[in-house]
Amino acid sequence: MSEDDRVVLDCGKTIEELSEYLDAGRAPYDPDIETCPECLNALDALARVGALSRDLVADDASRLPPPPDSWFDALFATIQAELKAGRSFPIHHPDPRVKITVSEGAVRTLLRATGDALDGVVVGRTQILGKAEIPGAPVEINISASVAYGEPFAAVAGTLRSLVYDALTRHTELNVAAVNVTVEDVHGGRSSKEKR
């Protein structure tokens, strides 16, 4: 990857720097990274993708070939695009002098973490459609996912839809009109979380 192709976060760190920091066990401690919400979101996403890679490699199921490198490249590209702060969504506070917002990037991180916590699911793309920066405006959530081989798509999509709706209701004030889940891919096995 050339220097021109590198993804630079708003804080100035690159995905490559964060990946190297994660590979080094987050040592020596870097306060610029460890106190930056954008960097912490990126580290979390990189750790989840790394765990998925290890799970797929370790998976003993010969029923499916391993995913092509392009699958991981596309997932990394999606995560990188979602790390930007984006729009600001308001959160009500009883004192009119206080303004509280949550960034679109933080909400996307919540969506990804909610989906990735579900066994056998890896979230691909997330979208927040609508005028979420206007209090009470209806929004739709679009999520694409890869599901483990052998899992019932409809059941997984229904569970993911419910978990995402609950997480958004609990942590934001978005008026969620719909959560749309699209299964776009199948991967070779359930995550190691189930094998423990």
Image (tube, grey):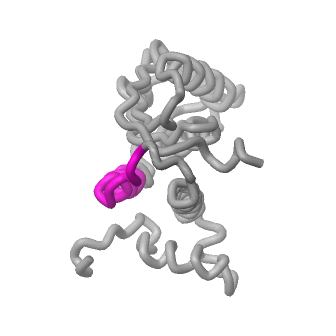
* 162 is higher (above) or lower (below) than 100: above
Q: Residue at the spot x=51%, y=54% of the render?
A: 56
Query: Is there any visible trace of residue 58 in the rendered image?
Result: yes
Instruction: Please state the horizontal and vertical placement of residue 126, each as a whole percent of the image.
Output: 41, 37
* 6 is higher (above) or lower (below) than 87: below
Query: Is there any visible trace of residue 174 in the rendered image?
Result: no
Q: Residue at the spot x=41%, y=42% of the render?
A: 124
Q: Is residue 121 magenta?
A: no
Residue 128 appears left or right of 34 = left
Residue 163 appears left or right of 16 = right
Of residues 67 and 91, the one nearer the viewer is: 67
Q: Which residues are magenta?
A: 64-80
In the rendered image, which quarter is residue 166 located in?
Answer: top right
Residue that protrudes farthest toward the front in the picture: 62
Instruction: Please state the horizontal and vertical placement of residue 76, each as a whole percent of the image.
Output: 39, 57
* 6 is higher (above) or lower (below) than 143: below
Q: Residue at the spot x=52%, y=47% of the render?
A: 61
Q: Is residue 71 magenta?
A: yes
Image quarter hosting the N terminus:
bottom left
Residue that protrudes farthest toward the top in the picture: 177
Residue 94 appears left or right of 145 = right
Instruction: Please state the horizontal and vertical placement of residue 169, each as a whole percent of the image.
Output: 63, 22
Of residues 5 and 36, the one nearer the viewer is: 5
Residue that protrudes farthest toward the right in the picture: 196
* 100 is higher (above) or lower (below) than 56: above
Of residues 80 and 74, the one nearer the viewer is: 74
Q: Residue at the spot x=54%, y=45% of the render?
A: 109
How many numbered tags mark residues here?
0
